Amino acid sequence: MLDSTTQVAQGRSVGAGELDALIIGAGFSGLYQLLCLRDRLGLSAQVLEAGEGVGGTWYWNRYPGARCDSESHSYAYYFSEELLQDWTWSERYPAQPEILRYLNHVADRFDLRRDIRFGARVTAAHYDAAANRWHVRTESGDRYTAKFLITAVGCLSSANIPDIPGLDGFTGRWYHTGQWPHEGVDFTGKRVGMIGTGSTGIQAAPVIAASAAHLTVFQRTANYSIPARNAPLTEEFKRWAKENAAEIRRVMHSTPNGHPFAIADRSALDVSPEARQAIYEAAWEKGGLQFRATFRDLLLDKTANDTAAEFLRAKIREIVKDPATAAKLADIDHPFATKRPPIDTGYFETYNRDNVTLVDVRATPIECITPTGILTRDGKEYPLDIIVFATGFDAMTGPLLRMDIRGRDGLSLREAWQAGPRSYLGLQVAGFPNLFTITGPGSPSVLCNMPVAIEQHVEWITHCIAHMRAHGMERIEAQPEAVDRWVEHVNEAANATLLPQAKHSWYLGANVPGKPRVFMPYAGGMARYREICANVAARGYDGFTLSG
Ligand SMILES: Cc1cc2nc3c(=O)[nH]c(=O)nc-3n(C[C@H](O)[C@H](O)[C@H](O)COP(=O)(O)OP(=O)(O)OC[C@H]3O[C@@H](n4cnc5c(N)ncnc54)[C@H](O)[C@@H]3O)c2cc1C
Ligand SMILES: NC(=O)c1ccc[n+]([C@@H]2O[C@H](COP(=O)([O-])OP(=O)(O)OC[C@H]3O[C@@H](n4cnc5c(N)ncnc54)[C@H](OP(=O)(O)O)[C@@H]3O)[C@@H](O)[C@H]2O)c1
């Protein structure tokens, strides 16, 4: 690990022109990658960012209720002891404004802003083999040339706005949660329709319902959710987190999902029903993603999973007073945690409010959007002033494929990934020399507490480029056979779990019509993946071709 600001070399700040490295995106990934390449390796590096500020996810997702599901002491960079000591989180799960403040603090603390171009959306990146350079173009026509191109575009940064007929003619206002207006939205006295009950919709519904005249939630797939039990952090906890940062990092690095808690080493089927119930009750009371860690086999064995699923369905029926609404909410068709499991603050309780209605659009699909509302197939129209699309993202491949990326011989990434993404370690694609994809498809990324996955990728890429410089190498490219082997391993890892059983999950690309159904993240666990990547590097970048 690259771990000390004492290694800082004086970096060069450059404008447009020839660069050692160009980084696309200024979220968690891009900020740290800039710091590593500029200040630790002394490269000329620049970030191009579509938004007008740093923060990525936390710059764009300003919807009501937006906050982290990772616990604050784990949702942070761990590369700098000084940074860990000088930042203090206020809540168990920080809200969007606090995370955005944190990332701005990081940008200022490490003087990163001078090498970031804001309002610079990359539209094309073409590799010139003769010159061994990437030529990059932005929406406004600016051009850049760099030896290394590093995408830090995020897994969840391309809004998925469903193509529902009539939206253009809607006379009210509509918003996607991932492109939320900076000035906020006033719901007071408004009839609001919200489409989507993923993590976002589940966070937003209680907050919108608190101020809207009426909230109608359009649910296609019912979802599990566990109470977050958010609360301000005590002074004691804040001190503990700082004093034990090294131990917290060790735990995060040793678990499959990068969270700061271990998964219990027991099967859900090895304990009595009474003991199991007590364990689930305690985890429900504690709240948060730790519920998944109660037993080791919840994602491996359907019978074990059923015990958790049934516990959570029973909780919904217990909380929601209207039996018909409770039945729709509890009619969940996939095993627990095979879609990213949301955590919430008063989500199911929201349906006990008089001003909230649930519409099951699996039973009665949305027919169209009318000028004044949403019409479902049973002929019922829901009059609305505002529509909120909590409909998620064209995840993982979307942000990459929205750019025209072309590698060797003009091969486009869209062609290369026509049948789904294919990468080596989620870090490189055969035919695209010197292109690195932070948290790319085929890496643990979204199955992990993401700052852990991001730091590992950024540091691996940094070490790799340092190695190339030390050995006079100019070019690195994934070997096609290594890609084939890795894709096979990614599939095996997914198939060893229950994850592919959620047929409509965005992990499989199933939320975007026409997208190839391929399980995209690596489900073999972050700790195992870290070891695989370290071994590849130790063996002289096995599976990559390096050349002078
Ligand atoms: C609402 C929400 C809550 C989340 N909560 C958690 C959580 O609790 N725990 C967790 O681990 N993860 C969470 N995530 C995942 C989150 O995306 C990551 O934790 C992390 O923020 C990703 O950082 P990143 O820098 O890789 O990508 P992002 O933060 O997505 O940043 C990518 C940046 O690239 C820019 N970009 C993309 N394409 C281009 C282009 N063509 N040209 C120029 N710029 C471009 C975007 O504008 C964006 O600013 C959440 C995601 C969402 C949407
Ligand atoms: N605090 C957090 O940690 C947090 C918060 C928000 C988001 N996130 C991250 O971001 C990811 C995405 O979350 P998300 O909630 O934004 O998206 P999501 O999980 O993809 O959920 C989108 C919702 O919209 C529905 N939907 C999509 N298209 C629709 C259509 N045409 N008609 C009706 N319903 C439609 C989906 O239904 P189907 O299920 O039927 O497709 C689903 O209920 C999460 O899984 C998580 O990784 C994290």
Image: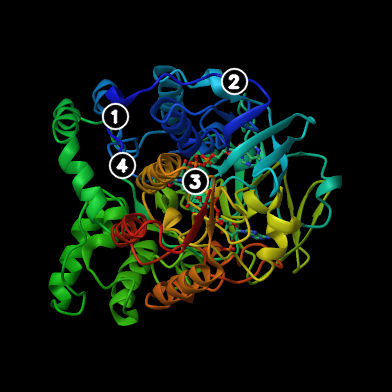
Q: Judge whether residue 65 can be spotted in this image.
A: no
What residue is at 37 percent from the left and 56 percent from the top? 540
Q: Where's residue 524, x and y in %?
A: 36, 67
Is 181 displayed left or right of 68 in the figure?
right
Is 123 displayed left or right of 34 in the figure?
right
The residue where tag 2 is placed is 14
Closer to us: 117 or 459:
459
Q: Secondary structure at mark 1?
A: loop
Of the image marks 4 and 3, the number of the one nearer the N terminus? 4
What residue is at 14 percent from the left and 32 percent from the top? 240
Q: CA distance from mark 3 to mark 2?
A: 23 Å
Of the image marks 1 and 3, the number of the one nearer the N terminus? 1
Q: Which mark is residue 473?
A: 3
The correct choice, above or below, for 260 with respect to 320 in the image is above
Q: CA distance from mark 4 to mark 3?
A: 41 Å
Q: Amino acid at mark 4?
A: Glu
Closer to us: 298 or 460:
460
